Image: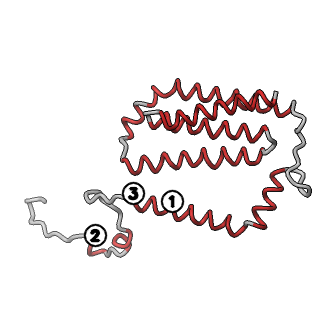
Amino acid sequence: MEVIAFYIFAAIVTVSALAVIMAKNPVHSVLWLILAFFTSAGLLVLIGAEFLAMLLVVVYVGAVAVLFLFVVMMLDVDFVELKQGTLRYWPFATLIGITFIAQIAIAGFARESSANANFNPAPDAPTNTEAIGQVMYTDYFLLFQLAGLILLVAMIGAIVLTLRHKPHVKRQNIAKQTSRRRKDATEKVSVEPGKGL
């Protein structure tokens, strides 16, 4: 069963990776990319690397959402038109969602029936999560922190590059508001009797 699941997942990864670069619609490309990441996570589950599988889903699928944010910021997409066109993507997204659920079921069943269910990644660690944690936070701790710093700088740079100042938009000036005096807010007017304002 594990071999059959591997061939199914490998075929889905190959097809979805080709569809990412061949799809003309960018929304379809991103959905195919999410499917490729999710299926790759299923392959990692089959070899007993559950932590890496969850890391792949959380980091890369989350990164796809950040990528969408940057694309929307840089291209100045009309949100009203974008919301109106989402209904046509529902059948395609539903198909990919059903594929996700089927992959989880296949990976879980193949993992339970596999002879390598008790996968030991290191002699001193009972699980692969502990083994990766020991290596990442001892031998490669500095590189891990530097990678996080580089990602933070890249995110700030993308925001700065895509920030646009609109001249005709009224903005709040907190310093001007807090430094306002009574004579700046009120005006004494001499009104002649019978004429009104």
Q: Nearer the viewer, residue 137 or 81?
A: 137
10 Å neighbourhood of mark 1: few (<14), some, or many (≥20)?
few
Distance from disc 1 to disc 2, alpha carbons, whole Å, reads 42 Å
Please report whichever mark, 3 or 1, sits nearer to the chain's N-terminal start.
1
Amino acid type assigned to the residue bearing label 1 in the image: Met
Residue picked out by circle 3: 162
Question: Does dot 3 land on a helix, a strand or a loop?
Answer: helix
Please report whichever mark, 1 or 2, sits nearer to the chain's N-terminal start.
1
Q: Please say if the residues under marks 3 and 1 sit with CB atoms less than 8 Å apart.
A: no
Q: Which mark is residue 20?
A: none
Question: Does dot 1 land on a helix, a strand or a loop?
Answer: helix
Question: Does dot 2 land on a helix, a strand or a loop?
Answer: helix
| Quadrant placement of the C terminus | bottom left
Q: Which mark is residue 155?
A: 1
Using residue 91 as the reference point, say whether residue 44 is left or right of it.
right
Which residue is at 21% across, 70% downward?
Answer: 187
Residue picked out by circle 2: 185
Distance from disc 2 to disc 3, alpha carbons, whole Å, reads 38 Å
Distance from disc 3 to disc 1, alpha carbons, whole Å, reads 11 Å
Residue 72, position as x, y percentages in the image: 42, 46
For the image shown, how many numbered marks are present on the structure? 3
Residue 172, position as x, y percentages in the image: 35, 63
